[in-house]
Image (cartoon, rainbow, N blue to C red):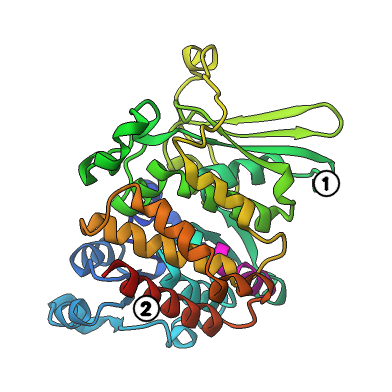
Amino acid sequence: MKRKIAILGSTGSIGRTLIEIIKKDKKKFEIILLSTDSNYKELLKQAKFFNVKNLIINNSLSYLEAKKNKFSRNINVLNNFDGLKKIFKKKIDYTMSSISGIEGLKPTIEVIKHTKNIAIANKEAIICGWDLIRNELKKNKTNFIPVDSEHFSIWYALKGIDSNIIDKIYLTASGGPFLKYPVKKFHKIKIKQAVKHPNWNMGKKISVDSSTMMNKIFEIIEAKKIFDVPYKKLSIIIHPKSYVHAILKFKNGLTKIIVHDTNMRIPISNSLYFSNQTIHSKKIDLKILNNLEFQDINLKRFPVVKILNKLPEKSSLFETILVSTNDKLVKSFLDDKIKFTDIYKKMNTILELNEFKKFKKLKVKKIDDIINLNNAVNDKLNSEIN
């Protein structure tokens, strides 16, 4: 029997990688739903290849364009996620949630009740709404698999192990394109430099996050929430080759080091097959293992790491302020409105405002709390940047 699956954000990098994996095993899967924000042309190609009958296109203009296509006349094309009950008559086997940004939170929460297993690649959803996600997972008995290479590595390393014996978890960071770039020249960094990651082929936004190290800050927050460990047990170390993805040191004196190829096929494939499938990968690279080049974080080069000291130990709405502020500032940098160095400077200013610091004590109770706060932060930053 074919496994029934859905891919939210199927035209993004994670979604496309999953599509390529499934293509080689097409007879084993039936795709019930695909979604995109605006790339309707790619979405229609995917739908035609897999004979998908349900599509969601969030962008209104792209939705209207897609509806004009002959293929769309015989399938169900929607403009939002409000009709999931009509699409899923019963629980499907697997869902990949890879819609980027806070916009991916509501669809992620909504789809949990309709799937037996959910792989989440949306950082913002986990950082801002983990408490809401966790409640839905428990209520609907849905299995969760993290997809980020670091969190998948930790998840895999902790199989069958009591998390209470964790002494320290190290998340590795490549250092991005500016690991050896002169700090005194940071104020002159151009957009084309910041989006050129040395190891990973990623979108512009996440590439900038990697260059500032904000991407790793987000991953620390995710790890704290997903694995329920305090910040003091989480640390970042530089590893330029991106070959080691996580190091786990246990109280019994043992340490696990998780290594895999520098691509997302490994965690995505394992989330889909639950490690029961042979996945072709390269041989162990002894040259890299003999020269791992682990380094401590240089705070002058990556000052954004100091933001970890501002975060409350308990989950709160303050994480939404961090995500919203970073999203807006990175967009402003990519729009050439602010300098690269302004990302941290302006972020630090916003996080120190009393009107936002009070949210450290406020818990997330519903999705609207996150959406409304995100809008408030955007309004504040619009006036600051202008």
Picture residue at 79% right of the left edge, 27% below the top: 254
Residue 185, image quadrant: top left
Q: Which residues are magenta?
A: 127-135
Quickly name the residue at label 1: 162
Element under label 2? helix
Q: Main secondary structure of the magenta part?
A: helix
Q: Looking at the picture, tell me which residue is in the foreground, 8 or 319.
A: 319
Picture residue at 83% right of the left edge, 46% below the top: 162
* Magenta run includes residue 230: no
Q: Looking at the picture, tell me which residue is in the foreground, 257 or 283.
A: 257
Residue 247, image quadrant: top right
Residue type at the position of mark 1: Asp
CA gap, disc 2 to disc 1?
Answer: 44 Å
Q: Looking at the picture, tell me which residue is in the foreground, 64 or 281.
A: 64
Residue type at the position of mark 2: Asp
Picture residue at 63% right of the left edge, 77% below the top: 364
Quickly name the residue at label 2: 379
Q: Residue furthest right?
A: 252
Lower position in the chain sequence, tag 2 or tag 1: 1
Query: Compared to 360, does 301 lie above or below?
Result: above
Element under label 1? loop
Asked if residue 127 lies left or right of residue 378, the reply is right
Residue 179: x and y in percent read: 40, 29
Residue 88 circle label: none
Residue 107: x and y in percent read: 47, 75
Frontmost of labels 2 and 1 is 2
Residue 53 appears in the figure: no
